[in-house]
């Protein structure tokens, strides 16, 4: 370990790669980190759940993290278990050159250990690879009997049939060759990271593209607090971040500094003027054209999707989108259909979806991508319903297009055209009570399926329906807002 006494984890090393300042703050000023959003918390939980399930690939191991209270204790216990030739170790902990890693699974085979790093994904990203290369570097330098490290991901081709077969659900990829090529790189970078900590000075690094690559930084709020304002050029939509940073670092920081020559496009000039005058852009003819395509009777529809990483229903794949709730709002009343999916009820859902929407000439949706994907999946499952489901798709009118095309633009949107932002800007009467996102809704649905108390199930179901109803009502009322606007 370095003379500073700091150990560098995989997480902190990846932060060092992204931004030296983020790394330093993470190690020395962690209280400045942004509060973890609910969606991020749920993403981390999913990763933990998949990692725990992957232990079925090599059952019967000992979990070092559950038997120790510190990283040093965990490393000592790991060494003891290795000396005892334990065949499977979970969360095996190693410390080399001041870098701390915890391998999800460490397995002994023919006298050598192989490590497995599990990711709750069907794709391998560059970040995952760098993470694995660093683990390999520490393991190879810590463990004489070490052979290889495999990245373990979910198999996108796996289809559940009665019971999950872990060996088929997951697939693995060796990182040995590329990892060993990167040893000099890690030697150099780790030395740099420790030197940075020893200086004990916050690096003077301004905001830049690194704030978002590969993920939005945990210290975004701290570093951007003087930039986030109503006048910031970063509120402008449809401009490349690289270009915005170029302007920002040249001194063009506020929207009123954006000249016609910089923006070039007439529509962007109009957006700038919208900010400066605090008046909405209304392209009346285009809005009228959109509205004229809506036939009556009309209703708005919203679906909620369940997409478990580990498939729960026969015939489904990892992350397959499974609709479990549809809400239809027609101005005065709303209707909904909810399935608990104790067994596969997707065909029943398809029939009820058709029944709820068939009497309407137009179905309003907001960003129809998810609904179209869900309907296409139902088509694959029930081809006998093709005529009715194709008819439903043809009736769908995407309200999102009005805002994405800037037919209507309000400076309150800034660069975000999500339903939540548009509704909160235009419709003060719309309020989301408990659930605030689709990912939260999926988590609530998981809770519903796991609950064994009928009253608890009904409470969760009511909250899910309320959330979905609010989305469909907001979509309907946005169109009503547009109709009143052009009149």
Image (cartoon, rainbow, N blue to C red):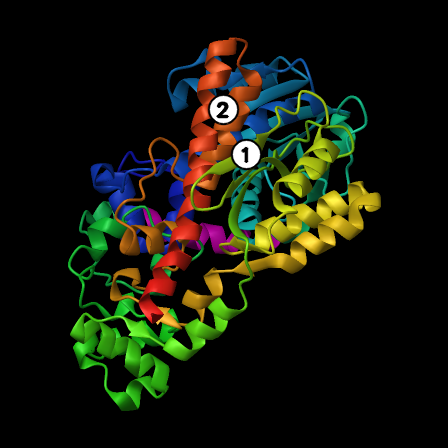
Using the rendered view, name the quadrant where residue 426 is placed. Answer: bottom left
SS class, disc 1: strand
Q: Which residue is mark 1?
A: 336
Q: Is residue 297 left or right of residue 391?
A: left
Q: As rendered, which of 107 and 36 lies closer to the eye?
A: 36
- Label 2 crowd bin: few (<14), some (14–19), many (20+), radius 10 Å: many
Instruction: Tell whether position 34 is magenta.
Output: no
Q: Position of residue 409 (x, y in %)?
A: 33, 69
Q: As rendered, which of 475 and 262 lies closer to the eye?
A: 475
Q: As rendered, which of 26 and 71 lies closer to the eye?
A: 26
Return the disc, 2 or 1, that comes first in the chain's sequence.
1
Residue appearing at x 18%, y 80% in the figure? 257
Instruction: Tell whether position 186 is magenta.
Output: yes
Task: Tell me the number on the disc at residue 461.
Answer: 2
Residue appearing at x 54%, y 38% in the figure? 141
Magenta residues (range): 180-195
Q: Is residue 42 left or right of residue 247?
A: right
Residue appearing at x 67%, y 36% in the figure? 352
Residue appearing at x 68%, y 34% in the figure? 349
Q: Position of residue 180 (x, y in %)?
A: 61, 50
Q: Is residue 452 left or right of residue 10?
A: right
- Please say if 393 is above or below 24: below
Quarter holding the C terminus?
bottom left
Q: Position of residue 395 (x, y in %)?
A: 62, 58
Decide if residue 319 is in sight here: no
- Please say if 475 is above or below 61: below
> What count of labels does the image hold?
2
Decide if residue 487 is in sight here: yes
Q: Main secondary structure of the magenta part?
A: helix
Quarter holding the N terminus?
top left
Q: Position of residue 354 (x, y in %)?
A: 68, 43
């Amino acid at each position: 370990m370095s003379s500073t006494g700091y150990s560098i984890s995989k997480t902190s090393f990846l932060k060092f790669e992204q931004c030296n300042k983020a790394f330093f703050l993470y190690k020395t000023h962690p209280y400045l980190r942004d509060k973890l959003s609910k969606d991020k918390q749920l993403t981390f939980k999913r990763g933990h759940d998949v990692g725990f399930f992957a232990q079925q690939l090599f059952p019967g191991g000992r979990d070092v993290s559950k038997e120790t209270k510190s990283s040093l204790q965990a490393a000592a216990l790991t060494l003891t278990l290795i000396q005892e030739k334990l065949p499977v170790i979970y969360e095996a902990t190693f410390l080399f050159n001041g870098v701390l890693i915890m391998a999800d699974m460490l397995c002994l085979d023919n006298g050598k250990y192989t490590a497995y790093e599990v990711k709750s994904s069907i794709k391998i990203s560059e970040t995952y690879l760098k993470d694995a290369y660093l683990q390999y570097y520490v393991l190879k330098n810590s463990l004489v009997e070490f052979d290889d490290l495999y990245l373990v991901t979910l198999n996108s081709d796996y289809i559940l049939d009665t019971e999950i077969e872990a060996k088929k659900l997951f697939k693995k990829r060796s990182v040995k060759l590329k990892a060993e090529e990167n040893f000099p790189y890690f030697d150099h970078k780790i030395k740099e990271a420790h030197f940075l900590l020893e200086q004990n000075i916050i690096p003077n690094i301004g905001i830049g593209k690194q704030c978002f690559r590969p993920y939005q930084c945990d210290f975004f709020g701290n570093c951007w607090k003087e930039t986030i304002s109503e006048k910031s050029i970063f509120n402008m939509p449809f401009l490349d971040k690289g270009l915005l940073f170029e302007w920002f670092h040249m001194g063009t920081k506020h929207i009123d500094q954006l000249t016609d020559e910089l923006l070039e496009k007439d529509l962007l000039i109009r957006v700038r003027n919208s900010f400066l005058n605090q008046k909405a852009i209304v392209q009346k003819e285009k809005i009228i054209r959109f509205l004229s395509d809506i036939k009556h009777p009309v209703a708005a529809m919203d679906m909620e999707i369940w997409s478990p990483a580990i498939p729960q229903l026969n015939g489904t794949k990892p992350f397959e989108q499974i609709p479990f709730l549809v809400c239809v709002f027609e101005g005065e009343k709303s209707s909904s259909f909810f399935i608990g999916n104790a067994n596969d009820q997707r065909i029943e859902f398809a029939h009820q979806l058709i029944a709820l929407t068939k009497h309407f000439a137009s179905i309003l949706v907001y960003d129809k991508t998810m609904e179209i994907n869900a309907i296409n999946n139902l088509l694959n499952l029930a081809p006998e319903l093709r005529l009715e489901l194709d008819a439903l798709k043809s009736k769908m009118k995407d309200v999102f297009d009005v805002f994405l095309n800037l037919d209507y633009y309000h400076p309150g949107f800034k660069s975000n055209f999500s339903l939540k932002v548009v509704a909160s800007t235009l419709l003060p009467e719309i309020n989301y009570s408990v659930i605030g996102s689709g990912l939260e809704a999926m988590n609530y649905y998981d809770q519903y399926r796991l609950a064994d108390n009928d009253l608890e199930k009904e409470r969760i179901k009511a909250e899910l329906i309320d959330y979905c109803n609010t989305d469909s009502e907001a979509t309907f009322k946005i169109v009503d807002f547009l109709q009143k606007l052009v009149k």
